[in-house]
Image: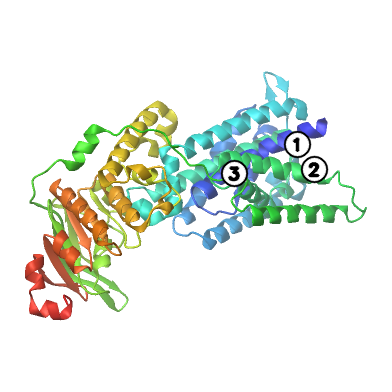
Amino acid sequence: MELVLHIGVMICIYAILATSFNLLIGFSGLFAFGHAVFYALGAYITALTALRLHLPFPLPLILSVIGTGLLGLAVALPALRISGIYLVIITLALQVIAIDVIINWTSLTGGPTGISGIPALSLLGKPLTGPAVFLPAAVIAAAACFLIARHIGDSPFGRSLRAMRENESAAASVGKNIFYMKVSIFGVSAALASVAGSLFAYYLSYVGADSFQVSETVLILSMVVVGGTGNLVGSVLGAALLVILPEALAFVDLPEGIAAQLRLLIYGCVLILFLVFRPEGLLREPRRGGRHAVAVSGNAAAELTTAAPAGGVVLEGTGLRKRFGGITAIDALDIQLTRGRVTGLVGPNGAGKTTAFNLLTGFLPADQGDIRFRGQLLRRLRPHELVRAGIARSFQDLRLFAGMSVLENVLVALPRQRGDGLLTLFLRPLLVRRQDAANTSRAMAILDFIGLADRAFDLAEDLSYAEEKLLVVARLIATEAEVLLFDEPLSGLDAGAMRKIIDLLRRLAAGGKAICIIEHNLEAIRSACDQLIYLDEGRALAQGNPETLMADADLVRRYFR
């Protein structure tokens, strides 16, 4: 019975580690490889403050959470500039450095021998020694950490994390602050992992470097993968399975002398078979939001079709220049986008059309020139700041959040979501819930407006190509930006789908939006655009209405043929 209770305590500790790691990998797409560092720091801070400073519980735990959370914020800094294998290497280096520090700083950490004699966790004057009395405390701690992680994962902030996981540039293009999200989730994940470290120190009354090696991070990662990335319940099940499995193998009758090696081999084979035949894990990532009736806001639907007066320059670029090494992509470009009009950027491939979009939306800094929005000079604002100001763009390759539902693709783009801030998320949960319900209603109104309401709960990756193009339009509408820039919104469509999107663009312009599109289809250009800007080699060679430019003999020879 003592062994069963001990296993229960260890499952709780590893469940905390797996759920906190899943926030990084499964929800945020940040493949860090140093989670055992946060685990170790929580354990050592607890050991040192409880043993040497004689601080009573819960002060060591609180200090562990704060100290480890701050380290998580620091670790996030390299993640802001790198991803993929480079992030793995950076965090793996952190893991190796941390172990070296623990082993060699003997005066603080006890070196290879570790720290022993840590006072037992005491509640109401009663020390919790032994698995029987420690297990309830471990269960409560694991449940609390799980609820915190689930609250984050099911919130607007969690939705934004999943959008960032799908595509960082697309998340920025709908107003999400990538810097804030990465720093915040690293801090939260580290803080939760420190709770497991604190429990470990109190439970075993000993901490040593051998408990926090790289293999420990591998074990935690295995729990997440086996349980299912993006599924917190799966993380708990993965932790339970991989804690119980080695203990169960101890009862297998194996030849003496090679028993330990054979058990390790069996353990590895079970993992490999599991990952080959069930790569998504025990539980798939859940469809958040569910298939339930959502009321469409009448006011929101009316706002989308309300006519507004045309006229007035909203966005203006003057003297824009951008070079890449010896290549001039944009050269002395002047562009004006006017409220209520659809402007087309046309020209051959490589003319600089997409580069112009990148300059106007902050994805590239201009080498020279000024950009003004409503007459105000924009000075090196980041993409998400420009979206919040009122300038949004799409991409030629769509960049939808394929693993999220159609409704979530629109919902994540709505501005001023209070649930995007962690403090508000935890301090004012009812306010966040009410606003999210209202936002869901508005997102459904947008989908109804473009004709995708019946696909709201389907994954974006399950849409047809024409429907994906419509969803791109819906996502830009959701930003509530005044200037909407579409990169080839009509390419690859049949005549019916093209006509539908042109009609949507016209209705948006009639509602007061300044629309700019990049397009190559001449009939679509003629139907959709009020004015054209012809670019070639980064220069605006001509501007005017479509009929005038298409009648220009030189431009016909160059392009319109």
Choose top left, top right, bottom left or bottom right for residue 50. Answer: top right
Residue at image position (40%, 39%) is: 156
- Asked whether residue 55 appears in the rendered view, the answer is no
In the picture of the structure, the residue carrying the numbered disc 1 is: 7
Mark nearest the camera among 3 and 2 is 3
Choose top left, top right, bottom left or bottom right for residue 291. Answer: top left
Numbered-mark total? 3
Cα separation between marks 3 and 1: 22 Å
Disc with the residue nearer the chain's start (1 vs 2)? 1
Residue at image position (54%, 32%) is: 147
Along the viewing direction, whichever of 102 and 190 lies nearer the viewer:
190
Query: What amino acid type is highlighted by mark number 2?
Result: Glu
Q: For the residue carrying disc 3, how many other residues have a C-alpha within 10 Å: few (<14), some (14-19), or many (20+)? A: many
Where residue 411 sits in the image (x, y, percent)? Answer: 35, 42
In the picture of the structure, the residue carrying the numbered disc 3 is: 283
The reply to whether callout 3 and callout 2 are in contact (CB within 8 Å) is no
Would you say 342 lies left or right of 68 here?
left
Residue at image position (35%, 62%) is: 397
- Asked whether residue 391 appears in the rendered view, the answer is yes
Cα separation between marks 1 and 2: 8 Å
Along the viewing direction, whichever of 4 and 54 lies nearer the viewer:
4
Would you say 363 lies left or right of 527 here?
right
Q: For the residue carrying disc 2, how many other residues have a C-alpha within 10 Å: few (<14), some (14-19), or many (20+)? A: some
Where residue 78 sits in the image (x, y, percent)? Answer: 48, 56
Cα separation between marks 3 and 2: 23 Å
Query: What amino acid type is highlighted by mark number 3?
Result: Leu
Would you say 410 lies left or right of 45 here?
left
Disc with the residue nearer the chain's start (3 vs 2)? 2
Which quadrant of the rendered structure holds the C terminus?
bottom left
Residue at image position (67%, 38%) is: 13
- Farthest top residue in view: 124
* Mark sitting on residue 247: 2
